[in-house]
Amino acid sequence: MANTKLAPVLETAPRFIRAMHAPAYLGMCREEFKNTVRPHVREFPIGKQGVAFDRHELDQWADAYIERMAIEKQADQDNNPPRSGRQGAKQWREKQCRASTRGTGFGTSTKSSEVADFKKALEQAKGRKRSST
């Protein structure tokens, strides 16, 4: 169900682009368009107050700008090495897990030395008095 209140979608871009839409057509802000593009392309009036630009002339300006400002990159740059550390048919090494291979249980520790060490540390922490300085 089409909404008749929406503007119809055009299959091709219009030949004349109004001044308020020209910056978006070139993908830049209005201020950049005013300083960089507008001095180099012709504009013409539409109606009493409208100003427009020729889409083909904007395209020609964009092509010339790209030729003038583009940065050529070397094809053999090695700044981006392959992300995978795997090379060809080499298999990944099996890494031993650092955790204990014995099963671990849940709950409190039953190892008496750990319990004794904890109690000793707890008593030391409780028994300390703050210094007055």
Image (tube, helix red, strand yellow):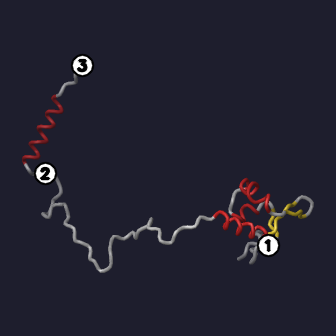
The C terminus, quarter of image: top left
Question: Residue 119's image quarter?
Answer: top left
- Disc 2 versus disc 3: distance between alpha carbons? 38 Å
Q: CA–CA distance between discs 2 and 1?
A: 77 Å
The kind of residue tagged 2 is: Ser
How far apart, in angstroms, are the residues tagged by discs 3 and 1? 84 Å
Q: Secondary structure at mark 3?
A: loop
Residue in view at x 79 percent, y 61 percent: 40
In the rendered image, residue 51, in percent from the top left (x then y), is placed at 85, 61
| Residue at image point 69% right, 59% down | 28
Q: Residue at x 76, y 67 (%)?
A: 58
Name the amino acid, label 3: Ser
Q: Nearer the viewer, residue 30 or 32?
A: 32
Mark 2 or 1: in front is: 1
Residue corresponding to mark 1: 14
Of residues 32 and 40, the one nearer the viewer is 40
Foreground residue, 40 or 97? 40
Query: The residue tagged with tag 2: helix, strand or loop?
Result: loop
On residue 132, the disc is 3
Q: Which residue is mark 2?
A: 109
**Label annotation for residue 72:** none
**The quarter of the displayed image where residue 93 is located:** bottom left
Estimate how packed mark 2 is, as few (under 14), some (14 to 19) or many (20 or more) residues with alpha carbons within 10 Å: few
